[in-house]
Image (cartoon, grey):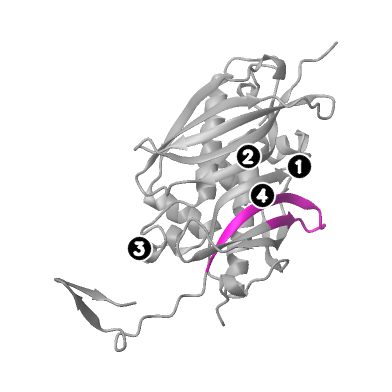
Amino acid sequence: MTAPEHFFRTRWFEDIPVGEFHVFGNHTFAEKEIIEFGQAYAPYPMHTDRVAARHSVHDGLVASGWHVCAVWMRLMVTYMERYATGVRDGRRNGAGIGFRDMKWLQPVRPGHNLTYTYEIVEKPDKVIQNKWGIIRSRNEAYNQYGELVFTFQIDILAERRPTD
Amino acid sequence: MSVRYWEEITHGEQFTTGTISVSASDIIDFASQFDPQPYHLDPVVGEQSIFGGHCASGWQICALMMRLFVDSMSNEGIASIGSSEVSSLRWLKPVLADDVLSGTIVVESLQPDSPHTGYGSLNCVIDVFNQSNVKVITLHTDMMVQKRPTEPIDPESAGPQTVGPQTVRVR
């Protein structure tokens, strides 16, 4: 297997405008996947045991915050794949280098549906390894009641347009 | 094992976690479900990528950090319920197939309250290292741990009192 072309970005760093906003996906959290993730990575009763979770601070089963993050990634990859279809000039998605101000504001319960959004908020004036720029986005997820459930800002590398 | 409450944890206290290994199939399983990018799904593509090897999703590293934390607190007898906030996290180095991770948790400060009644916060710096002692992620987070329960009400000495038409229990 070689890297599929559909993972290549459509745009250089310079072409990505601050203020651009995307609703990039949604996901319904099933009880089974909440428990599986919890058992593997965050084995607290509130994530792993429907009955014991009733005595937890959330009065019932809730998804691990890192599960909410992992689903963010899954939806982002799916969206980027579609977004970049047909581009064949070798520009690549960069890696995430870090995030800040991550907050889990509301519990995510079995059957809850989260809609994920991102907005480009800043392009810090910094060049990394002579090749990459930083795209800073504010990411949010809302539940089916319209409540803000999850928010963070992430820095992702994007390839700068070659100067020659 | 004795229980340790928030009140018994001190500023500057450090915890060392156990270890957790990451196999190629662990990386592929997580990536298939949550981060299906070629350098996570395919060892050969990983070798040729900017990561220089078959690397785990950054979110898998976060999840493994959480597992190390949860087990560490459990071993210490501390009733933690995780975090509601991560003020910053940096992915410093890739985690590659067959790496073995461990972490340190340093309590930088303590807050008596948290979003949940009965729990205080530990403002922690958590670092995760690979088997070569290279730091792979670092984060600042507020972790919530149980506070010492307040004295239970003695039902004999605090019997019901009648106030007008209502019966209330004196605390």
State which tag comes first along the sequence, 1 or 2. Answer: 2
Q: Residue A148 in the image: x percent, y percent? A: 44, 38
Distance from disc 3 to disc 1, alpha carbons, whole Å, reads 43 Å
Q: Which residues are magenta?
A: B125-146
Q: Are marks 3 and 4 on the same chain?
A: no
Name which residue type carries label 4.
Ala
Q: Are marks 1 and 2 on the same chain?
A: yes
Asked whether the beta carbons under mark 2 and mark 3 sit within 8 Å of each other, the answer is no
- Chain bearing tag 1 is B
Outermost residue to the bottom: B156
- The secondary structure making up most of the magenta span is strand
Name which residue type carries label 1.
Gly
Asked whether the beta carbons under mark 3 and mark 4 sit within 8 Å of each other, the answer is no
Outermost residue to the front: B164
Name which residue type carries label 2.
Leu
Instruction: Residue at 51% x, 35% y: name it.
Output: A140
Q: Which residue is label 1 attached to?
A: B53
State which tag comes first along the sequence, 1 or 4. Answer: 4
Q: Residue B166 in the image: x percent, y percent? A: 17, 71
Q: Which residue is label 2 attached to?
A: B41
Label 2: element kind: helix
Instruction: Residue at 41% x, 47% y: name it.
Output: A108
Distance from disc 2 to disc 3, alpha carbons, whole Å, reads 37 Å
In the image, residue B116 above or below residue B92: below
Instruction: Residue at 43% x, 50% y: name it.
Output: A33
Q: Which residue is label 3 attached to?
A: A54
Distance from disc 1 to disc 4, alpha carbons, whole Å, reads 11 Å
Q: Which residue is label 4 attached to?
A: B24
Q: Are marks 1 and 4 on the same chain?
A: yes
Q: Dot 3: few (<14), some (14–19), or many (≥20) neighbours within 10 Å?
A: some
State which tag comes first along the sequence, 2 or 4. Answer: 4
Residue A130 counted in the magenta span: no
